[in-house]
Image (cartoon, grey):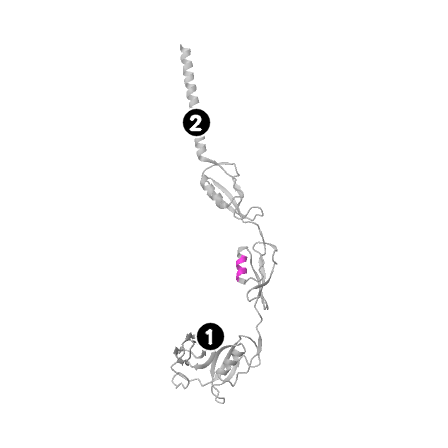
C-alpha cells in the first residue's frame, strides 16, 4: 500500500516537472519570437527600401558614412553590420554604409553650349569650373563654348575642374574716330551713329573766341582707333549760368513739348536723356499724327535731351542744373 502511494506521488511530481518545463520552454520561445528578428540582406539595396524595411522590423538605422564604389550604384548599401542572417533583438542598431557611386565621370561635350548650360552640366556631373579664357570667333555665338580641357569623353575623377575657351562673338569692326569739332550737336550725333558709335554725354564748356553751340572737344579724339559701339563724349561751347542769372536757351522751365505733323500712321516718338554718362528714355511710345506730347525733364542735373521720330533725329536740347 505504501509502495503504491509512493508510485502515485512520484508520477504526480514527474508530471508537475514535465508540465513546468514545457510551459517554460513554450514561454521562452514565444518571448524570443516576439523580441528578436533575423537581419535581412541589405547590401546592394536602395537606401529608401532599406529604411522602410528596417522600420517595419523594428530596427534602428545608423549610417556610418558613404564611400565611392565602382560596383554598387549611388544611394545603395555597400556594407551592413550585423551581417545578414544574424538574430538580434528589436530596437537594436543596424550600421550601414551608403554608396556614392563611381568615383569617375566621363567629361561631357560642351562645345556650342552656353556658359550657363555648362555650369548646370558641371553641377550634375560633380565637376567644377576651371580656368576660363575668352576670344573672338566668327562662327560661334557670344558666351558659347569653343573648346574645353579635358576633352569630351575623357574619364576623370569627380570634382575635377574643366577649363573652357568661350566665344566673345564676332570681332567688332574698328574705325578711325571722325573729327566732330566745329559741328553742331545734331550733326555730331548723326555722324556718331553713322560710324556705329554710341553718344554718351555732353559737357558745357565756354570759349569766347569760338562760335556758340558748336563742338569744341571730343573723347576719343579725332583719328584715334575705336571699335563699334564705343562711347563718345562731347563738349559744346556754351556759357554755364548761375542759378540767379537768366537762362537764354530753350525751355528754361524744363518741359519739352513736340507736336507731330498730320498724317495717317502712328509714329514712334522717343525722348532720350543723357546725363553723367548714363542714358535712359523719358518717353518711348507710338503717337497718332497731329497729337502733341509734353515731357518733364528732371531739373536737378545738367543733361542733354534728344528727340527722335521713327528713329530720325529731330532736335537736341541742353539743360543746365537748377
Asked if labels 2 and 1 touch by Cβ distance under 8 angstroms, the answer is: no
Q: Indicate which disc, 1 or 2, sits on the residue closer to the N terminus.
A: 2
Q: Quarter holding the C terminus?
A: bottom left
Q: Judge whether residue 238 is colored magenta.
A: no
Q: Residue at x 45, y 33 (%)?
A: 33
| Residue 256 placement (x, y as % from top left) | 40, 80
Q: In the image, which residues are magenta?
A: 116-122
| Label 1 Cα neighbours within 10 Å, binned few <14 / some 14-19 / many ≥20 | few
What is the secondary structure assignment of the residue under circle 2? helix
- On the image, the x and y values in percent for residue 79 come to 54, 43
In the figure, 277 relative to 66: above or below?
A: below
Position of the N terminus, as image quadrant, is top left
Identify the mark at residue 24; answer none if there is no mark. 2
Q: Which mark is residue 165?
A: none
Location of residue 25 (image quadrant):
top left
Q: Which residue is mark 1?
A: 278
283 vs 201, nearest the viewer: 283
Q: Tell me if residue 322 can be seen.
A: no
| Nearer mark to the viewer, of 1 and 2 | 1
Most distant residue in the bottom direction: 209
Q: Secondary structure at mark 1?
A: strand
Q: Does the segment drawn in magenta span residue 120?
A: yes
Quarter residue 292 falls in: bottom left
Label 2 neighbourhood size at 10 Å, few (<14), some (14-19), many (20+)? Answer: few
Q: Nearer the viewer, residue 70 or 31?
A: 70
- Main secondary structure of the magenta stretch: helix
Foreground pick, 321 / 44: 44
Q: Give how far apart the Cα atoms at labels 1 and 2 are.
A: 95 Å
Q: Picture quarter containing residue 90?
A: top left
Q: Position of residue 194 (x, y in %)?
A: 53, 79
Residue 12 is at least partly visible in this image:
yes
Residue at image position (43%, 32%) is 31
Amino acid at each position: 500500500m505504501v509502495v503504491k502511494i509512493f508510485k502515485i506521488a512520484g508520477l504526480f511530481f514527474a508530471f508537475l516537472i514535465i508540465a513546468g518545463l514545457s510551459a517554460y520552454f513554450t514561454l521562452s520561445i514565444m518571448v524570443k519570437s516576439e523580441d528578436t528578428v533575423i537581419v535581412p540582406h541589405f547590401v546592394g539595396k536602395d537606401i529608401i527600401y532599406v529604411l522602410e524595411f528596417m522600420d517595419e522590423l523594428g530596427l534602428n538605422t545608423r549610417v556610418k558614412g558613404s564611400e565611392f564604389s565602382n560596383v554598387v550604384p549611388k544611394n545603395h548599401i555597400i556594407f551592413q553590420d550585423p551581417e545578414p542572417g544574424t538574430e538580434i533583438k528589436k530596437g537594436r542598431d543596424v550600421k550601414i554604409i551608403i554608396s556614392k557611386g563611381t568615383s569617375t565621370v566621363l567629361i561631357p561635350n560642351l562645345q556650342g553650349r552656353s556658359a550657363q548650360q555648362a555650369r548646370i552640366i558641371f553641377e550634375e556631373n560633380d565637376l567644377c569650373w576651371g580656368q576660363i579664357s575668352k576670344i573672338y570667333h566668327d562662327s560661334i555665338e557670344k558666351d558659347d563654348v569653343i573648346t574645353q580641357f579635358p576633352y569630351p569623353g575623357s574619364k576623370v575623377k569627380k570634382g575635377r575642374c574643366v577649363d573652357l575657351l568661350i566665344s566673345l562673338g564676332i570681332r567688332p569692326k574698328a574705325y578711325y574716330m571722325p573729327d566732330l569739332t566745329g559741328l553742331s550737336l545734331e550733326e555730331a550725333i548723326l555722324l556718331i551713329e553713322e560710324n556705329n558709335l554710341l553718344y554718351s554725354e555732353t559737357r558745357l564748356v565756354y570759349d569766347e573766341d569760338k562760335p556758340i553751340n558748336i563742338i569744341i572737344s571730343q573723347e576719343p579724339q579725332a583719328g584715334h582707333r575705336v571699335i563699334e559701339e564705343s562711347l563718345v563724349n562731347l563738349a559744346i561751347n556754351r556759357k554755364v549760368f548761375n542759378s540767379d542769372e537768366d537762362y537764354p536757351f530753350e525751355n528754361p522751365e524744363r518741359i519739352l513739348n513736340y507736336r507731330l505733323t498730320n498724317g495717317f500712321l502712328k509714329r514712334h516718338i522717343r525722348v532720350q536723356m543723357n546725363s553723367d554718362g548714363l542714358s535712359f528714355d523719358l518717353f518711348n511710345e507710338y503717337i497718332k499724327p497731329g497729337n502733341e506730347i509734353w515731357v518733364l525733364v528732371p531739373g536737378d542735373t545738367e543733361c542733354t535731351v534728344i528727340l527722335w521720330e521713327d528713329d530720325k533725329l529731330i532736335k537736341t536740347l541742353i539743360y543746365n542744373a537748377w
